[in-house]
Amino acid sequence: MSLRDDVISRFSPLFRNPARLTRDDYLEFLTIRNTSHWSDVERRDHEAADDMDHLRTAIALLVDHSTPLPARIDTVRDMLPIVSVDTLTPILLVAYPDHYGIWSETSEAALKDLGDWPGFESGATTGEKYQKINETLLRLADEHRVDLWTLAALWLLEHRPKEPTPG
């Protein structure tokens, strides 16, 4: 089984039904050793686990397809202002790997470098921006015949933000 399959089989059921999500599960999801994918998340967003009932409620709203995607993102960002979009979108990816890509500093840089960064209307919300970014990620994954997990890994290989060199 691949790392992708391991991560999805472990965390997808928890994010699709967050009533079973424990503090340890959430914190383990944030660590790069468990995903090898989103290193930026490991350094932040831990505080959300201080109120697991609130976090579970927010994740339940995030993955609820009966509400339009932009509204879900914006509502959850209001509920959890300490949790960044580059944590929310990996949760979506793992919960629904065929539907959601990752919006992170790395993917944003890659999309801009490739000339695929979408334009946004003035005053667009984070959720509205993510919807357009996700549409672009879905298109690129389809064009290159890769899944969204692999697309995120490709961004890491080519567009990881440079670490400052020691002075």
Image (tube, grey):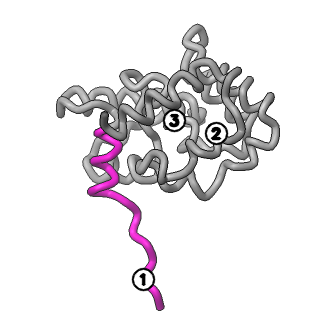
Q: Where does residue 106 sit, x and y in percent of width and height?
A: 40, 53
Residue found 29% across the figure and 39% down from its top: 150
Q: Earlier in the sequence, mark 3 or mark 2?
A: 2
Looking at the rendering, which quadrant does residue 160 occupy? bottom left
Q: Counting residues from the N terminus, which is met first, the one under dot 2 or under dot 1? A: 2
Q: Residue furthest bottom?
A: 167
- Above or below, 70 against 164 in this view is above
Q: Measure how far apart labels 3 and 2 are at the Cα level.
A: 14 Å
- At x 66%, y 23%, the residue is 18
Q: What is the span of residues highlighted in magenta in the rendered image?
A: 150-167
Single out the mark in the foreground, 3 or 2. Answer: 2
Q: Which mark is residue 165?
A: 1
Left/right placement of residue 67 relative to residue 48 reads left
From the image, tell me which residue sits under label 2: 26
Q: Residue furthest front?
A: 1
The disc labelled 3 sits on which kind of residue? Thr
Question: SS class of the residue under badge 2?
Answer: helix
Q: Contact (CB < 8 A) between labels 2 and 1?
A: no
Residue 2 drawn above or below residue 104 = above
Q: Disc 3 versus disc 1: distance between alpha carbons?
A: 29 Å
Extreme residue toward the top, this view: 66
Amino acid type indicated by mark 1 = Thr
Assess disc 2: are there few (<14), some (14-19) or many (≥20) residues with their C-alpha within 10 Å of its C-alpha. many
Few, some or many residues within 10 Å of mark 1 (<14, 14–19, 20+): few
**Residue appearing at x 43%, y 72% in the figure:** 163
Closer to the eye: label 2 or 1: 2
Which residue in the structure is indicated by mark 3? 89
Return the disc, 3 or 1, that comes first in the chain's sequence. 3
